[in-house]
Image (tube, rainbow, N blue to C red):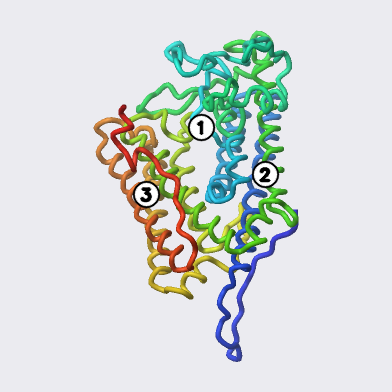
Amino acid sequence: MKRLSTVFLFTTCLAGPALAAEPADVVRNYADIAEAVYGDSLTTAQTLRVAVGTLIAQPSEETLLAARKAWLAARVPYQQSEAYRFGNPLVDDWEGKVNAWPLDEGFIDYVDPSYGQNEENDLATLNVIATPHFTLSGKDVDATTITPALIADTLFEAGGVEANVASGYHAIEFLLWGQDLNGTGPGAGNRPWTDYAQGTDCTNGNCDRRAQYLLAASDLLVSDLQEMTAAWAEGGAARAHVTDDPQVGLMAMLTGMGSLSYGELAGQRMKLGVMLNDPEEEHDCFSDNTYNSNYYDGIGIRNVYLGSYTRVDGSVVTGASLSELVAAKDPSVDAEMKARLDASVGALLAVKTRAEGGEAYDQMLAPGNKEGEALIMTAVDALVDQTPAIERSIAALGLSKTTFEGSDSLDNPGAVFQ
């Protein structure tokens, strides 16, 4: 990966007026930030893989907690990458391998008897970890050894069902935390470390195969992130898509911002859970880390507009920005856009602060929790309110009108309950 340097601007009394940003510079900086954010996602996933390896080699409460801590740290940079999804087909096609949700966890491992059957997914309680041989789409599958290739090529979306999420952050999350059986009450998943113990100390059976699965899923996450980091490096296909034609690049930036802000984050990930009072609709449902994932999504949207990203080591990648381009065309639109972004990040921060104060996100979703609902809906409304400002930014730049991802929870609420 090429080294990314922080850009500093110096002025002197002899300097002339600042030159306006050029679209080519803006999309180049956008690609540089993508390379950095996926690079950080990769390095934190590699740290997670080391922690997982230690857990498997030396299972204990301490090594399980260390692996969980590494998983939580890995989410911080990755969530800031999500604003790159919807405007970039290569990213959107790839994203499901690493961040698809929700998942039918019974497909992977044991679940509580209350989990029940799923009429829409015959494989929802397959339990691959306990089943070394099974039939899939009429073919016998030998899962005696669980490998990254088995997960990626055979188990991922098995039977054509998207809920059979066999790989990525959430599969690993489930294997580290287990099911959260607390509903909208306090507490996250509480998988015992002895699920990875060997011999007579093993709990819930198949500890050796559970270890195989966790290692294979962690290896696969690393290799998938290596692929995407390379795609944004010099000569990579994702970088070329946005830099070969700067107008295409600018549309990718704004489409990604709008679709994540409106349909995905405000709608699917936040308002739907409030409408259903359903903790199963929270993004990081096993670990109760949803408040952080939502917050860093909001930070990622703002990063794209401001052309700046703070890396996990504290250094900053920054350069020509959409904000500069929009300000040159219509300063009032730029001012509104920045104010709306600050408002949404502030509202998401308020949810994060409440969660860190002791009330988990799923508790905020509980029926009758008016304060929790109001806090989440304030963030939803702020994300919805910034969407028209994104549209005005597109118009200010003279770009073609685009359609952002939608959500029934926002566009057709009645359909949610049908």
Q: Residues within 10 Å of mark 1 (few under 14, many from 20)?
A: many
Whether tag 2 and tag 1 are in contact, CB under 8 A, the answer is no
Image disc number at residue 350: 3
Q: CA distance from mark 3 to mark 2?
A: 29 Å
From the top left corner, tell me how far across and down residue 165 is, in percent. Answer: 57, 27
Residue indicated by mark 2 = 42
Q: Is residue 126 left or right of residue 221?
A: left
Q: Is residue 384 left or right of residue 128?
A: left
- Give the residue type at disc 3: Ala
* Vertical placement of residue 136 versus 6, above or below: above
- Give the residue type at disc 2: Leu
**Mark 3 or mark 2, earlier in chain:** 2
From the top left corner, tell me how far across and down residue 203 is, in percent. Answer: 59, 12
Q: Quadrant of residue 17?
A: bottom right
Q: Quadrant of residue 172?
A: top right
Residue indicated by mark 1 = 101
Asked which secondary structure carries label 1, the reply is loop
